[in-house]
Image: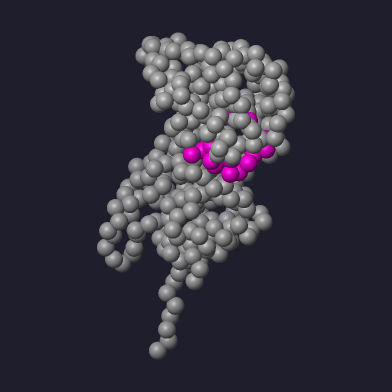
Amino acid sequence: MVQQQAAILQPETLIEEFKQNGVTHVVTIPDSETNYLYELMKEQPWLEIVPASREGETFAISLGLLVGGKTPVCLIQNTGMLESGDSIRGMALDSGFPLVMVVGYRGWNRHGVITDSVARYTEPFLNAMRINYYLVESNEDGPRISEAFKEAKATKRPVAILVGDEYHGFNRV
Amino acid sequence: MFSAADMFQKFQEQRGNAIVIPTGTCGRHWRDYSQNESRDVNLGGAMGHTTSASLGLALGLPNEKICLFDSEGSLLMNMGIIATIAGKKPKNFVHFLMDNECYATTGGQPVPNASEINYAGMAKEAGYASTYHFDNLEEFADNIEAIMKATGPVFVSMKMVPEVENEPIGMRKRIPQRSRPETIAALQKELNITAP
């Protein structure tokens, strides 16, 4: 019997998509699952990391970078996205700039029962803010990240990437 | 305490080519003194995040001097930003704080610990390259040239005379001002930045 490796998302996929889409800055707050992605980002000479103190800052810092002609992404967890509501409104939705936000989908799973409340509220929150989103669970989903960049640019609005496999997507395998 | 109008008059003399982000009730006086409107930018507001957006602008335009005129009520909502700014060490960033010890736009209620809090001390301990505190115009005027030449991030706390508004928002006289998209478009045109 041939053993098949489960489809996973590797951090290298995110880095490659960032590079392809001309990302210059990642504005972020690390969470428990992002350390390897963070280390990998630090190794990229074309990428500047901007560590923030709270997630709401990431959208405003990104606006300033966009005004300056740069291409930032926000990298946060869904818990911090909920905290960022007014910043998303005032600094992203109302500003008329394209922005991709990469959001760790803590608590989400495809096959089991969702017990973490933040996972239950994540998609309703994005729907309430009328922010479109793409679920990324494996390397095969990588092109969806480019789709998000394309959509953000075309609509001049924020678009979210929900990283559904946080453990692998942000960690070593 | 000294008046924001007098402060801006002195600042204008040393402004040079700096990009200026005025905020709050005190910030409205800047339009009376600015001589380079295309470099005045409104980054909008969201619970204290103009400070964060100004940091982003400083990081995005490292060869331009960025001067934010922040207010203490706004900074209190987002105090972690001083650590974020100190951590990124933007050499081109001057963070002025107009501290009138109250929420002037909502009727003058005091901000928490209004008269005892030491914002310059907090910025210094957070790691700003240099910090200043002024409660009179003369000392501010004597130092503004050095402040504008200093390597950032610089923090300048200033005690401002409050200009309290008590009328409901809908009854206040509206002074026409350029919108956020207009100021951003003008700045990007001035700097030859192509919108993404």
Q: Residue at x 46, y 66 (%)?
A: A168
Q: Which residue is drawn at 57% across and 60% down?
A: A39
Horizontal side of A151 relative to A20 (left or right) equals left
Horizontal side of B8 relative to A106 (left or right) equals right
* Place of residue B146 in the rendered image (x, y in percent of width and height, measured from the top left): 71, 25
Asked whether the viewer can see residue A45, the reply is yes
- Reply above or below: A122 against B170: below
- Reply above or below: A42 against B75: below
Q: Nearer the viewer, residue B46 or B106?
A: B106
Q: Is residue B99 magenta?
A: no
Q: What stretch is highlighted in magenta?
A: B80-95
* Place of residue A102 in the rendered image (x, y in percent of width and height, measured from the top left): 48, 52
Q: Which of B84 and A144 is in front in this view?
A: B84
Q: Which residue is drawn at 58% across and 50% down?
A: A49
Q: Which residue is drawn at 69% across and 18% down?
A: B142
- In the rendered image, the quadrant that contains the N terminus of chain A is bottom left
* Place of residue B46 in the rendered image (x, y in percent of width and height, measured from the top left): 45, 32
Furthest-bottom residue in this view: A1
- Reply above or below: A155 against B2: below
Q: Does the magenta stretch include residue B83?
A: yes
Horizontal side of A133 relative to B156 (left or right) equals left
* Place of residue B194 in the rendered image (x, y in percent of width and height, measured from the top left): 65, 39
Asked whether the viewer can see residue A136, the reply is no
Horizontal side of A6 relative to B53 (left or right) equals left
